Amino acid sequence: MSAKNLKSLIGRWEPCDKSSPVVVEIHDTAVGPKVRAFNKDDGEEFVVSKVEWDGKALRFETSVPSNKWRTKNIFRPTSKTKVMQELTFWEPWKKVRSDQVLKTPSRRVSEGSKSIHATAARSQKL
């Protein structure tokens, strides 16, 4: 069964919703799976390392040379044409003095009969 699952991962993968220009190609070699990752918009190749197949999931890390983004990826096949990707990324943060922090105003969000306080959240597209 594990070899069959690996076989279903062989090929080219991209997000279903096209939310990212990243493409991952998976090849089977005599020594195990080989992963290639790149940005299809600008052609930048990512550095791929720590490729490991455990019989159920393919794990690998990537590093993007232009911006130094690093990710840890886990691909779990859910069918012959779909995978579920678990993605962890690292980014550097710095400590700032509290008087330098921009205060974000609270806004009230109504949900049925409840009121929920929400603050604007930082989002980052990968």
Image: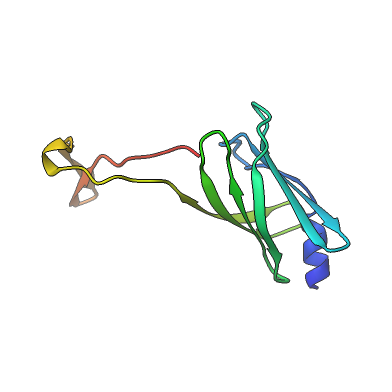
Residue at x 19%, y 52% (from the top left corner): 113
In depth, the one of 15 and 90 nearer the eye is: 90
On the question of residue 77 being in view, the answer is: no
On the question of residue 81 being in view, the answer is: yes
- Among the 4 quarters of the image, the one containing residue 30: bottom right
In depth, the one of 43 and 80 nearer the eye is: 43
Horizontal arrangement in the rendering, residue 43 relative to residue 73 (left or right): right
Q: Position of residue 87 (x, y in %)?
A: 54, 53
Q: Is residue 104 above or below residue 9?
A: above
Q: Quadrant of the N terminus?
A: bottom right
Horizontal arrangement in the rendering, residue 55 relative to residue 85 (left or right): right
Q: Is residue 55 above or below residue 11?
A: below
Horizontal arrangement in the rendering, residue 29 relative to residue 66 (left or right): right
How did the renderer colour the structure?
Answer: rainbow
Q: Position of residue 105 (x, y in %)?
A: 15, 36
* Furthest residue in direction top, as rendered: 42
Q: How many marks?
A: 0
Residue at x 69%, y 64% (from the top left corner): 52
Q: Position of residue 117 (x, y in %)?
A: 18, 48
In depth, the one of 1 and 113 nearer the eye is: 1
Residue at x 86%, y 58% (from the top left corner): 29
- Among the 4 quarters of the image, the one containing residue 46: top right
Q: Is residue 17 above or below residue 78?
A: above
Q: Is residue 7 above or below residue 2?
A: above
* Furthest residue in direction right, as rendered: 30
Residue at x 15%, y 43% (from the top left corner): 97
Horizontal arrangement in the rendering, residue 29 relative to residue 22 (left or right): right
- Among the 4 quarters of the image, the one containing residue 40: top right
Q: Position of residue 90 (x, y in %)?
A: 45, 50
